[in-house]
Image (cartoon, rainbow, N blue to C red):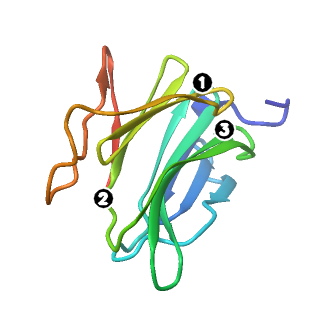
Amino acid sequence: MNDTSPAPGSLLITAFNGLVAAYDRASGDTVWTFAVPGKSVPGVRPRPTSAELREGRVFVFSGGAEGTFTKRVFLEVHALDAGSGRLLWAQRVDSEQSSTFAGGTMLVEQGQVIVSHRETLTAFDADSGEPQWSRVSEHGGGGLHSPLLQLVVEGARGRLLT
C-alpha cells in the first residue's frame, strides 16, 4: 500500500452484478471500482458477485459464462489491493457446460482462499493465488440438485454465491 492509499479499515466495499466499489467511510467518496471481466451467467440476472476484505486485500468471488450457443459456466476469484483496487491475482475455479448457474461458497481464512463449486473443493494461497489443492467432497454430485456446500473453520464461515 502506498502513502496515498486509504487504510482498509476506512473503506466500505460493495459488490453487485460484476462491479466492486470502494468508498471512503468518512466522506462517501468513491475510492476505486473494479469490473469483473467477462460475461454474466445464463439465466441469472444480476451477475453473482461477492467480496470479502481481509488483511489489506479484497477477495472477489464471481460467476460467469463463456460461449454463444453452448454456455460454459464458471466461478472466479480475484484478489485486489484494498487501497487501490489493483488486481493482484485471478484464478478460475471451475468450468462446465451448463445452461444454469449452481452457485458456490468462498472462505478466506489463515492465508487461504477455499472455494466450493458443486462437489469440488479448491484451495488457493491468499497471497499469490497459487493452487494448493483440489478434491471432490464426500457429498457427491447431489443428483438433480447441485450441492451448495457450507464451509466452516473455527471462528469463520464461508460466503455463499448464488
Q: The N terminus is located in which quarter?
A: top right
Q: Earlier in the sequence, mark 1 or mark 2?
A: 1
Horizontal placement of 131 versus 48: left or right?
right
- Secondary structure beneath label 1: loop
- Asked if the residues shown at circle 1 and circle 2 are in contact, with their CB atoms under 8 angstroms apart, the answer is no
Q: Which labelled disc corresponds to residue 55?
A: 1
Q: Residue at x 16, y 56 (%)?
A: 145
Above or below residue 152? Residue 120 is: below
Quarter of the image for residue 48 reads bottom left
Q: Residue at x 24, y 46 (%)?
A: 148
Horizontal placement of 3 versus 125: left or right?
right
Say which amino acid is labelled 1.
Glu
Q: The C terminus is located in which quarter?
A: bottom left
- Secondary structure beneath label 2: loop
**Front one among 68 and 13:** 68
- Whole-angstrom CA distance, mark 3 to mark 2, is 28 Å
Above or below residue 70? Residue 51 is: above
Q: Residue at x 19, y 36 (%)?
A: 139
- Whole-angstrom CA distance, mark 1 to mark 2, is 29 Å
**Front one among 101 and 56:** 101
Say which amino acid is labelled 3.
Ala
**Residue at the disc numbered 3:** 82
